[in-house]
Image (tube, rainbow, N blue to C red):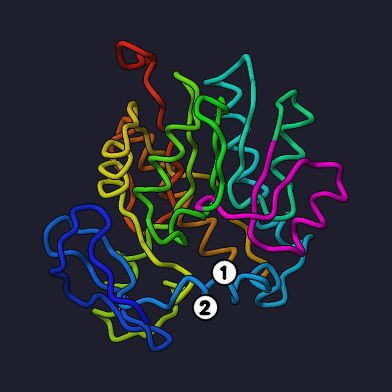
Amino acid sequence: MQDVHCNLCESHTAFTVATQNGHRMVQCSVCGLVYLNPRPSRQMLMAQYEKYHERDGKNEETWARLMEGNIEEAAALLNLYLPCKGKLLDIGCGYGHFLEKMQRQGWSTLGIDPSHKVIVSARAKGLTVIETTIDETAFSGDTFDAITAFYVLEHVGDPLAVLTKCLSMLRPGGMILLRVPHTTPIVKLLAFFGLKNNLYDLPFHLYDFSPRTLQVLLEKAGFSSVKFIPGRPTLPEKLWERSISIVSITLARFLFVASGQRLLLPGTSKTCIARRAWAGGFLDD
């Protein structure tokens, strides 16, 4: 196990939020970033990821149904903000469902994922994918027009370094689109009522981001024009999980619209978009 400091402000001062599966999630006392500390070594985590996509009985079809709404939403956003399309990198591409959709819509696509099994499946679809992690990639600068990462950033050891690398790989005016959970408000609420849970999915999730901490991370990495929206719900196979997901996101989206896009309901997943500024100035959206 490795002790780490806050990835956002480098403080070593934090308090425990929850202990789940024998692991401790803490919150930075200075900036509020929530992270796992101590954490398993990178080697231990990578060994577990080989069967990550098969956990809880999942397979390629269940992942497609789970992420269908996220994929539709992301495609619409990218086509809206980047109508000329271009070159897309999907980090943690899994079985390649999003890459398939974007390729059909005229994008030049590339995916990366550390799991050998899903890479084999994606290649069988004729997709260009690489078995690797974002930490190990060595793409030249100004390569991509868009970078996507669905439920990936909470798994990486150094989110700030990953975002900084992503910025360097984007062309000026390019966009990053992230989908991240925001679990801490629900964990604290359940703890108040004495209800145990495993919502952090430890030790797989190394971080939990609020909109504020993620925005600061993105801006520290050099991104601009950061925006958040309550994303479309994931659709788990279990009826009660699906019902909770649909109801919570529906409420979050209603409050977001009703508040003039100011209110982001705590405890629900967020879709975040940000841009690399054009040379000499920031973007006007």
- The amino acid type of the residue labelled 2 equals Met
Give, as a single range, the part of the protein colored magenta: 110-135
Q: Is residue 119 magenta?
A: yes
Q: Is residue 62 above or below residue 142?
A: below
Q: Is residue 243 left or right of residue 175?
A: right
Q: Which residue is mark 2?
A: 44
Q: Is residue 24 above or below residue 252?
A: below
x, y percent for residue 117: 77, 64
In the picture, the disc for residue 225 is none
Q: Which residue is mark 1?
A: 241
Numbered disc 2: secondary structure:
helix
- The amino acid type of the residue labelled 1 equals Glu
Residue 98, by quadrant, is top right
Is the residue marked by circle 1 packed among few (<14), some (14-19), or many (20+) residues within 10 Å?
few
- Classify the position of the C terminus by image quarter: top left
Residue at (75, 56) in percent of width and height: 119
x, y percent for residue 274: 40, 31
Q: Is residue 143 above or below residue 62?
A: above
Residue at (42, 47) in percent of width and height: 162
In front here: 87 or 243? Answer: 87
Q: Is residue 186 magenta?
A: no
